[in-house]
């Protein structure tokens, strides 16, 4: 394997730190993490340093001149870009934040990448680009499904996808992989002993994501939680999502680096191809943790589609990706152990 210079933006954050962990553990690539530490944490960086050394740059991507200097000096061949705002309801109330942080800053990063001769760009996109699928196919949503975001978060990511595609069309040397993440959850699986003891996980201060919230209830950090809508057209009326363990998702990014050596730019769904309802997730969390907590029914949340389930045939066949932690109970258990 060639030794590469890799820049990870948002590497102190939830998904970025799991990718950094795998790269530091399993490869000898030179790693640079860029993060503004707004949601990512210095503690996570310390944990990563205990694996091996890497460079860290504390920087906000909105500092265009500094981003340009970093890329000019860095001699990076690959950028893995996570840094973004990611909360759907917040994007509805504060859309400008999302278009600035996600679309504008990403466009600048892509521009600097091309200027600095970076050849590969791996981008975190989202299933939110598909919006509210009408007639959800039995086999899940594939990458050719109509993109039609119903919230600013999804649109901010779709716009960045388009910038990447157009840039790659105009610059033959520049290639990308776009991953459209379904619902990422769980924490660091580290089977060096027979216990599940995550070293890194999701430490977003004001959690909004379902499994994180349920794990906060299971550890009694939070007294109760709400189900946002039980009148959707789904199995039990609650929203259905395709939950993927963060370490399986991270593994796809590691594969993408070498994939781009031989293959053309492409878009891949990242999910397990199986949906669980909000009620099923909460029941599973209660069962694996032996905890009980109050769950209220609340109105639907703005911008939430009824169901999002991936078709993951493409990533499995073309990228040879085979998930290892495809198990809702394990996802809930690892989130809970991290929360503890
Ligand atoms: N959800 C819920 N209660 C919560 C948080 C989330 O009922 O406290 C629901 C939400 O309405 C959606 C699903 O759980 O149907 C997943 O939401 P999440 O915010 O985790 O991810 P999203 O799909 O919005 O990216």
Image (spheres, grey):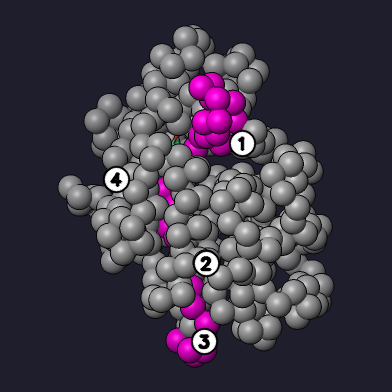
**Residue 327, picture quadrant:** top left
Circle 1: element type:
loop
Report helix, strand or loop for mark 2. Answer: loop
Q: Secondary structure at mark 3?
A: loop
For residue 219, side relative to residue 194 (left or right): right
Residue at 44% across, 45% down? 248
Q: Which residue is mark 3?
A: 173
Q: Which residues are magenta?
A: 169-198
Give x and y (percent) for residue 242: 36, 41
Q: Is residue 98 left or right of residue 298?
A: right
Residue named by callout 2: 1
Closer to viewer: mark 2 or mark 1:
2
Tell which circle, 4 or 1, labels the residue nearer the N-terminal end: 1
Q: Would you say the residues marked 4 and 1 are in contact, meaning their CB atoms lie under 8 Å apart?
A: no
Is residue 223 positioned above or below 328 on the image?
Answer: above
Sequence order check, earlier mark of 2 and 1: 2
Answer yes or no: disc 2 within 8 Å of ligand 1.
no
Residue labelled with disc 1: 201
Q: CA distance from mark 2 to mark 3?
A: 20 Å
In this orientation, does residue 175 appear?
yes
Task: Give the mark nearer the N terminus: 1 vs 3.
Answer: 3
Separation of residues labelled 2 and 4 (CA atoms): 31 Å
Q: At numbered mark 4, what does the secondary structure look like: helix, strand or loop?
A: loop
Query: Where does the C terminus fall, quadrant-wise?
Result: top right
Q: Position of residue 271 (x, y in %)?
A: 37, 48
Mark-to-mark CA distance, 4 and 1: 23 Å
Judging by the rendered image, the residue that carries numbered circle 4 is: 273
Camera-side residue of 70 and 260: 260
Q: CA distance from mark 3 to mark 4?
A: 33 Å
Disc sitting over residue 307 in the figure: none
Residue 294 appears in the figure? no
Q: Are marks 3 and 4 in contact (CB under 8 Å)?
A: no
């Amino acid at each position: 394997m060639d030794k590469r210079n890799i820049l990870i933006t948002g590497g102190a954050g939830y998904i970025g730190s799991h990718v950094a962990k795998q790269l530091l553990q399993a490869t000898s690539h030179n790693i640079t993490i860029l993060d503004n530490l707004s949601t990512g944490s210095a503690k996570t960086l310390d944990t990563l340093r205990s694996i091996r050394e890497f460079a860290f740059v504390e920087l906000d991507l909105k500092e265009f001149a500094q981003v340009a200097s970093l890329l000019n000096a860095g001699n990076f061949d690959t950028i893995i870009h996570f840094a973004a705002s990611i909360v759907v309801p917040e994007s509805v109330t504060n859309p400008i934040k999302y278009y600035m942080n996600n679309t504008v800053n990403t466009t600048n990063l892509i521009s600097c990448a091309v200027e600095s001769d970076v050849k590969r760009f791996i981008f975190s996109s989202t299933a939110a680009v598909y919006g509210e699928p009408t007639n959800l196919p039995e086999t899940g949503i594939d990458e050719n499904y109509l993109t039609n975001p119903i919230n600013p978060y999804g649109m901010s990511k779709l716009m960045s996808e388009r910038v990447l595609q157009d840039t790659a069309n105009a610059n033959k040397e520049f290639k990308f992989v776009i991953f459209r993440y379904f619902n990422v959850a769980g924490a660091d699986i580290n089977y060096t002993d027979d216990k599940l003891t995550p070293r890194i996980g999701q430490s977003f201060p004001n959690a909004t994501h379902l499994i994180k919230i349920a794990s906060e209830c299971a550890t009694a950090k939070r007294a109760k939680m709400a189900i946002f809508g039980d009148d959707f057209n789904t199995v039990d009326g609650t929203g259905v999502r395709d939950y993927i363990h963060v370490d399986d998702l991270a593994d796809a990014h590691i594969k993408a680096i070498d994939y781009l050596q031989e293959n053309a730019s492409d878009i891949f769904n990242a999910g397990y191809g199986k949906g669980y309802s909000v009620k099923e997730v909460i029941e599973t969390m209660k069962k694996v943790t032996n905890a009980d907590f109050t769950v209220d029914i609340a109105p639907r949340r703005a911008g939430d589609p009824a169901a999002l389930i991936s078709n993951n045939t493409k990533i499995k066949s073309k990228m040879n990706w085979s998930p290892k932690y495809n198990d809702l109970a394990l996802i809930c258990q690892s989130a809970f152990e991290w929360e503890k």
